[in-house]
Amino acid sequence: MDPVDRLPRTGTFRPHRVVVLALDGLLPFELGIPHRIFGRPRDGRGRRLYEVVTCSVRPPGPVETDADFAVHVGNGPEALATADTVVVPASYELGPVYERGELTDELAAALARVRPGTRLASICTGVYVLAAAGYLDGRPATTHWADAERFQRLFPRIEVDPDVLFVDDGDVLTSAGVAAGIDLCLHIVRRDHGTAVANEVARRTVVPPHRDGGQAQYIQRPVPDPRQASTTGARAWALGRLHEPILLRDMAARESMSVRTFTRRFREETGVSPGQWLTRQRVERARHLLESTDLSVDRVARDAGFGSAQSMRQHLQAALGVTPTAYRRTFRAAGGRSGPPAPVGT
């Protein structure tokens, strides 16, 4: 049976359907990211939370890659009409899409099948497809840092951020190059089903559930002397005592550095300041406790290092757009839900 028709579109349980659009010149690694990440999550009854389908803009058949082999894609563009989320990986043969920001007739006809309200995501230069289709006009987006300047010139109406690993603008999400597609897909799982489910997928994939910093740390710069001390030990030390007040000078002292040197080295290694990193770790700790325990909001705030429920509420609102109580209500019983919850914006 054709996978497009395999599952009913109604009923008490239906996995969220992710349709991956495979274009000629695609990068096999990036094509595999959505299948790897979305193919793992399951609910408390062992049912897959996502169904991943690959399609092309033509009838079923071979699609060329940037390697010395082609891939056989079993679905044509009609699969796009069944998608809850469409993912567009990078391609090195986008032709007029990349050169002039214009869709080919074939690609335009395929995208016309996407239903209104479908969530859209791109990996690396797949963002050119979303931009050429007009989905990103007046919205923030990102792409590979080496391509960001050209992308901005070609699409001046888009707010391009070249420094981040991904941009979540609600129903349209874009990621930086290559491995940032993993960050983006894990973020979508986290947004749909909470940190516990996303962390389990990350563990099975042997990747960090959340990478610190942005693209700036990957831009070529003079290589630091490997004999110089790093900030790894201080970060490990801080993670073990997030519930306590942590001063910058104490972290620097752990590495026998001045505060100024430590701060510079920390940003070089993580892409963010020590203060931003600590806040992010405390937000993640609070999310985990809200999902996995029945601790009061006040206790979660103390254990995560925010000191007070009001402080934690402010930080969660800034990072997630929801209150601690709303977050817990959405994700506390994530394992037993019959389908994805309403998304939590980030």
Image (cartoon, grey):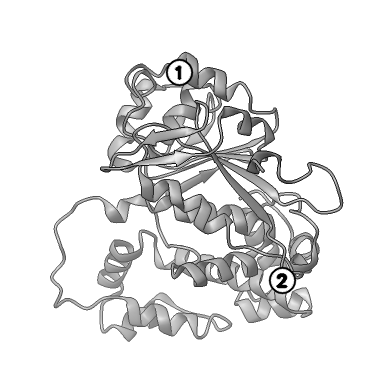
Q: Is residue 51 left or right of residue 148?
A: right
Residue 105's place in the image compared with 127, above or below, is above
Label annotation for residue 103: 1
- CB under 8 Å between discs 1 and 2: no
Residue at image point 49% right, 63% down: 210
Which residue occupies 49% across, 21% down? 107
Instruction: Please determine whether, in this image, residue 332 is positioned above or below residue 151.
Output: below
Q: Amino acid at mark 1?
A: Leu
Res. 89 in view: no
Nearer to us in this view, 264 or 12: 12
User: Residue 209 location in percent, x, y?
Assistant: 50, 66
Q: Is residue 317 visible?
A: yes
Give the residue at x 56% y 26%.
135
Q: Classify 10 Å Cα crowding around label 2: few (below 14), some (14-19), many (20 and above).
A: many
Between 44 and 236, the residue placed more toward the observer is: 44
* Image quadrant where residue 320 sits: bottom right
Q: Position of residue 72 (x, y in %)?
A: 44, 40
Residue 75 x %, y % = 56, 35
- The residues tagged by marks 1 and 2 sit, at their Cα atoms, a distance apart of 43 Å
Given the image, on which type of amino acid does mark 2 rest?
Glu
Q: How many marks?
A: 2
